[in-house]
Amino acid sequence: MESASQSNFAAKKKAMPCHNQHLNNANPSQPEHAATGSTKQVRFANSSHTISASSDPHEDDKRSETDIFSTVQQIGPQLKLLPLNDQIRELQTIIRDKSTTRGDFVFCADRLIRLVVEEGLNQLPYTECTVTTPTGHKYDGVKFEKGNCGVSIMRSGEAMEQGLRDCCRSIRIGKILIQSDEETQKAKVFYAKFPPDIYRRKVLLMYPILSAKSIVQEFPDITILTTEVHPVAPTHFGQKYFGTD
């Protein structure tokens, strides 16, 4: 699942490092599973649609590690990947399985959305504060700065709205509908409703699937947060999630 933000979506100073930060510090020729025994931290498919067979699973993992490292390097720091684990990989598998029921699809999609939303909020700026506990003790903590909002790209992006509301009950959410113009075949905004002061807000732009490389090329100031980069995208997401397939 993928979520993007505008240029004013600042990274939190003490935010949890995303997966591509680990990749940038690692040598792609030395896959992480070599240092962690049987644990497989990165298992992305090749960037091309060609599927190659190998009798050595470690060799496949090595190629996958190199491929994702290359993709992250090409897109640049605008792309942030959540740390890959078996939970995320299983959820991605279930939503791609054609035999998955709609109930299971929605359940797993909502879990992925929640992970992206939580990490997206973790990237927002905060200020330090001190509160008093019920026992009278002082606790030094943090609080997020005000002035955030969400914008969902209709229709698939609307699936992410509830996940954001579950984390931020009073957050304002706008909508935008973008489709191809019948004459020019270029993207055209057909509908947009934003908070009136959106220009002063930090925006979480919500859409579950997108072409990260082309988006970054067209909007170089954007930051993309996602759980996976893969050549085979679940393009059926909107129809399956809303039951129109």
Image: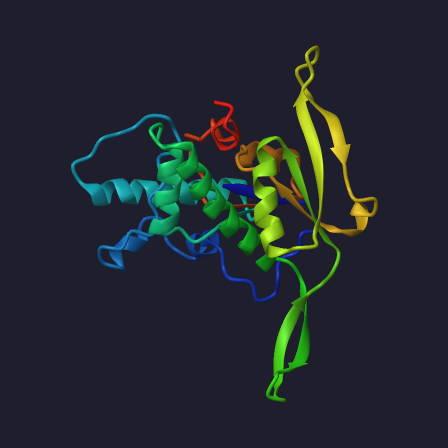
User: Residue 93, image x and y in percent?
Assistant: 35, 38
Q: Residue furthest right?
A: 196
Residue drawn 21% across and 42% down?
57
Q: Is residue 106 above or below residue 124?
A: above
Residue 65 in percent (x, y) is at 35, 45
The front one of 192 and 126 is 192
The reply to whether residue 228 is in sight is no
Please give the name of the residue rendered at 63% of the width and 89% of the height, measured from the top-left corner. 136
Which residue is more in the foreground, 187 or 150? 150
Q: Tell whether 199 sits left or right of 63.
A: right
Horizontal placement of 204 versus 112: left or right? Answer: right
Where in the figure is residue 107, as x and y percent of width and height?
A: 44, 42
In-image side of 216 versus 57 (left or right): right
As drawn, the residue found furthest toward the top would be: 183
Quarter of the rendering containing residue 129 = bottom right
Q: Is residue 211 visible?
A: yes
Q: Residue at x 38, y 29 (%)?
A: 48
In the visual, does 119 lie left or right of 45? right
Q: Position of residue 155 (x, y in %)?
A: 61, 30
